[in-house]
Amino acid sequence: MEPVGQGASLRKFGPLFALLVAAVVVVVVVVTGGGDDDADQPVTQKSSSVEVDDGAEQSSVAAEKPSEDGGEPESEEVAPATTAPRALGTDWGPDTGFRPGVMFFDRAQELGLDIDWGERCDTDRGTLAIPSFFAGACAAPYEGWNGGATDRGVTEDSIRIVWWLPQDVDPIMAYLTSAIYNDDTTADDEHTIRGLVEYYETYYETYGRSVDLTIMIGSGNILDPAAARADAVKVDEEFDPFMVIGGPTLTNAFAEELHARGIPCISCGPGQTPEYYRERPGMAYTLGKGPQQLNMMVAEYIGKRLAGDPAIHAGDASMRGQERRFGRIWNLASRASVDSNAQFEELLAEYDVEVVESQSYILDPATLQESAGTVIARMKEAGVTSVIFNGDPIAPRDFTNEAAAQDYWPEWIVTGSVLVDTTAFARTYHQEQWSHAFGISNLSARVDRTVASSHFLYEWFHGEPPRANDNIGIIDPAPGLFYAVLQGVGPELTIEGFNEALFSADPTRSALTAPSLSYGDKDRWPDSQEPDYHGVDDIAEIWWDPTVEGLDEIDRDGRGMWQFVNGGQRYLLGEIPDGAPQAFEQEGAVTVYLSPPASEASPSYEPLSSR
């Protein structure tokens, strides 16, 4: 089935959403690929996916509920797609290129429409009056009836949203966050979430509706599929929402149960394979790259920048004169991880590059140190000069410590496996080993978060910093996407319309301090990856500098920072230049911008909350 809106001719609705992100924004814990929940090993995979229901062409949404006798699920009609007994409100005419009731500033100017845009819009820029280069487009204020109960969880004045949060006592989450001393609590997260909802609803057009938010605390840890499924059943049967945000980050069970019940979600679990999204058109989106897309970028980087040359950045003098021999360490998160690894090796083979030693590991605190010893020994025995690491942000600590213990000093090639390329986690690794780390990152060059970030905007709007001081960069992208797309959907809010608006949007603007995102068919990926259900499309080249002092992504001062090549220049697939990497070259490199680059500066405004 073709995704709804895939062939639509809707015009873009401006910047898709404000990329108000600190460096760690779009993810929490990642490794590779989605997979089956019955795998024997723990799962540590991509999170912070943005998922959207399929918007099937029907007059009502059918939710599957278990039958009382335990047999086949029964189909229950839960909400009419429209209950409109009268005409909608503001009508801009049939030829706007937008959905009914929607109008954006640039198009209004083209049509010569006289609109009172209100205080929330900077009419000189045509964007929201917020102090960010990435401010979203102004949507025209809407007046009149909005269609009422247009979809499940939607009324004339509300949109039911459930936001899932982990328990404060979740031992798996504690293991992942303790390394960087993240002390935000669930209560801190909830307070910040509600503050973000207030901020977005002040500036974004919601067509007469406000989010009716329910915070749900998980019944199990983020690795427990049984608890995850039970939580999804509870969401369906007790809350009946339009959409869910958040979920257990290390199991697919929550998302899959929600999808089976016709409930879309944002950031509700690990990423899935391209086939998963195509089989559930419009049901699931992610903010980050898909595993196969990331494999393509890494293979291109290695094939163009590293293959066939000496390992000049290795810590062992004897290696620096040798042609690079590549090994790969990867997280065995599920059976899909095996497929992803095989695909990566096939992609490298297209550049005539061979992985001479491939070793997987499982993220298990009880066994990780022991397995690290075995993996490093095999890399050393195989004569690997350059270790390609694709895994979680905790494991490099054990692998680098073990490499030092075995007097093994290779190059470490980072691959954008999320949070490994954050300063906060990288400082926990063996620093002499990591001084030979370089590669690619999905993240962008940071700006001091006191002058440009989701943290900055929250404090600007509310007059006080977020209580979730560490987590806000991770929390913010999901509502940021939701409200921006909501503007493009218009008054007739349906999942079908949500999908159509998202797929019709142009890619977000390219920048040094933010990635570019796009969805649908935008010709940024091979046909096998389209329509594209993933967000971030580009990468930057980075290298680790253990000598620089500064603040990490959660404002901890210390030594060691990621350097971004050429000020954070970003590349799409096919754009990575040939030639030696620019790693370890100080000229043009940047760790953190103390103020936004001149090309990404924005005006100052008084927040509407203070007027």
Image (spheres, rainbow, N blue to C red):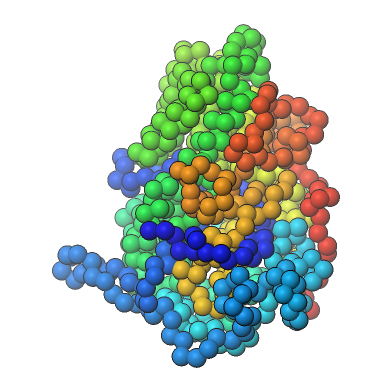
x and y percentages locating residue 416 in the rendered image: 57, 38
Residue 472's place in the image compared with 210, above or below, is above
x and y percentages locating residue 573 in the rendered image: 59, 39
x and y percentages locating residue 132 in the rendered image: 75, 60
The answer to whether residue 492 of the structure is visible from this angle is: yes
Left or right of 348: which side holds 452?
right
Residue 449's place in the image compared with 565, above or below, is below
x and y percentages locating residue 76 in the rendered image: 28, 75
The answer to whether residue 487 of the structure is visible from this angle is: no
Residue 212's place in the image compared with 235, above or below, is below
Front one among 51 and 383: 51
Which quarter of the figure has residue 373?
A: top left
Q: Residue at x 47, y 40 (%)?
A: 292
Quadrant assignment for the N terminus:
bottom left
Q: Residue at x 72, y 75 (%)?
A: 111
Q: Residue at x 53, y 24 (%)?
A: 351
Front one among 336 and 127: 127
Quadrant assignment for the C terminus:
bottom right
